[in-house]
Amino acid sequence: MATEDALDDEPAHGGLGRLLAFSDGVFAIALTLLVLDLDVPPGLSPAELGVHLTQLAPHLLSAALSFAVIGRFWLAHHEIFRHVCRLNRTVLALGVVLLAPIVLLPFSTALLAEYGDLEISVIVYSMTVAAAALLEIAILVQGTRPTAPGHRRTLTVRRIIVGTAVAAAGFAVAVPLAFVSPDWAKLCWLAALAPVDRLVR
């Protein structure tokens, strides 16, 4: 009879397929929720329509930002699981927990759109994205642990870990900085755009 530890380290390709399918559905729902509050009332005059669209601008910008963030997490999610070689219960659990900040992004996006000049909005958004990035690192670290002495993670895996860590650091630093200036804190988000791949190479 297999022990709990043996079961925990046993490869489970079926489990991976189910996790990725479930995750894809969650990512798709999160992307859809970003635009649910974007509506145009009927019967507006041209002047009223212009005013309404102007008022929607912060929502559109926040939705575009979060669409890019969620899209990048989805791409990274699939890239990460291409390198996972130890699919155990811990990795599967982390994969499910990762979806929590993803489904919270539409809420933090709406908060940012309405109250983007307040530190609490920037803090909530930054913490949500940082949490997702840290969970991706945890999945990759746990799922690519060397299976024998002397084995090392591939350069690609290490590059992904470093790049994700830089993005997580940018959003994490934004949390305390938001108490000083929400606008300065938002500049820290640009760390996610840093060309880490080239620097690591």
Image (cartoon, rainbow, N blue to C red):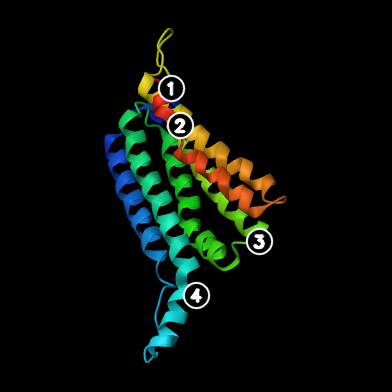
For marks 4 and 1, the one nearer the N-term is 4
Residue 4 visible at all: no
| Rendered residue at 57%/43% (across/down) | 188
Vertical relation: 39 (above or below) 11: below
Per the image, the residue denoted by label 4 is: 55
Q: Which mark is residue 163?
A: 2
Tags 4 and 3 in contact by the CB under 8 Å rule?
Answer: no
For marks 1 and 3, the one nearer the N-term is 3
Asked which secondary structure carries label 1, the reply is helix
Which dot, 2 or 4, sits closer to the camera? Answer: 4
Give the image quarter of residue 67. bottom left
Q: How crowded is the residue under tag 4: few (<14 C-alpha within 10 Å), some, or many (20+)?
A: few
Q: How crowded is the residue under tag 3: few (<14 C-alpha within 10 Å), some, or many (20+)?
A: some
Residue 12 visible at all: yes
Q: CA distance from mark 2 to mark 4?
A: 36 Å
Of the residues shown, which amino acid type is indicated by label 3? Answer: Leu
Tags 1 and 3 in contact by the CB under 8 Å rule?
Answer: no
Asked whether, in this view, residue 30 is left or right of residue 168, the answer is left
Residue sticking out furthest to the front: 47
Which dot, 4 or 3, sits closer to the camera? Answer: 4
Q: Which mark is residue 200?
A: 1
Of the residues shown, which amino acid type is indicated by label 2? Answer: Gly
For marks 4 and 3, the one nearer the N-term is 4
User: Viewer-proximal residue, 83 or 184?
Assistant: 184
Q: Which mark is residue 118?
A: 3
For marks 2 and 3, the one nearer the N-term is 3
Of the residues shown, which amino acid type is indicated by label 1? Answer: Val
Tags 2 and 1 in contact by the CB under 8 Å rule?
Answer: yes
Q: Position of residue 141 (x, y in %)?
A: 46, 27
Asked which secondary structure carries label 3, the reply is loop
